[in-house]
Image (spheres, rainbow, N blue to C red):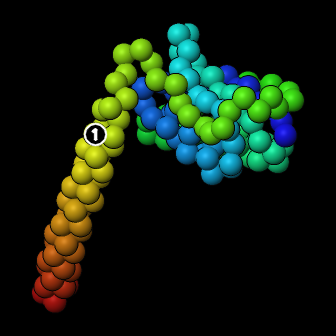
Amino acid sequence: MRRVIAHVSGKVQRNGYRSAVSIRAREFNLTGYVMNLTDGRVKIVAEGEEDSLQEFCESLWINDYLIQVDDVQVEFSRATGDYEEFFWVLDGYEDPSLLDEYAEYFKELLRVFKEGFQGINGTQDKDAGKQDDMTEAAENR
């Protein structure tokens, strides 16, 4: 068993990065924690099998529409067995009771977004059909 301490910089606070790290850590059967630091970075302490830790460290490089990881500094050492699970440390202003509520709002937003685009696709198909009809009529002139 090994331990990794990682410091991640970039656009990694207040955008779901800790949650994404927690999900990945659990997928790799790691224990430890992830927390925001006052300097804008995120600190991760994780313990587990060395192969899993290596893959986990690679997975920390998240770059999507919300998260932009610029740098990941890692340091390996011997595991201490201090943790039974992987968790994320809340900032002082965060109310843990609201996290589930926010997740439900986000799920609803995704559902509405997805349904809205399904309707747009149907409209696009109709518009494309009209364009085909107009092109055919112009070619037959």
Query: Is residue 104 in view?
Result: yes
The residue lying furthest to the bottom in this view is 140
Residue 122 falls in image quadrant: bottom left
Amino acid type shown at disc 1? Glu
Q: Residue at x 58, y 18 (%)?
A: 41
Per the image, label 1 sits on a secondary structure element best described as: helix
Across and down, in percent, residue 64 comes to 49, 41
Q: Nearer the viewer, residue 110 or 90?
A: 90
Which residue is labeled 1 in the image?
A: 101
* Residue at x-position 37% and y-position 29%: 96
Which residue is drawn at the image coordinates 69% and 28% (left, top)? 45
Numbered circles on residues, count:
1
The answer to whether 101 is drawn above or below residue 115 in the figure is: above
Q: In the displayed structure, does residue 12 sit left or right of residue 75?
A: left
Q: Quadrant of the N terminus?
A: top right
Location of residue 74 (image quadrant): top right
Could you say which is closer to the camera, residue 21 or residue 96? 96
* 127 to 137, vertically: above or below: above
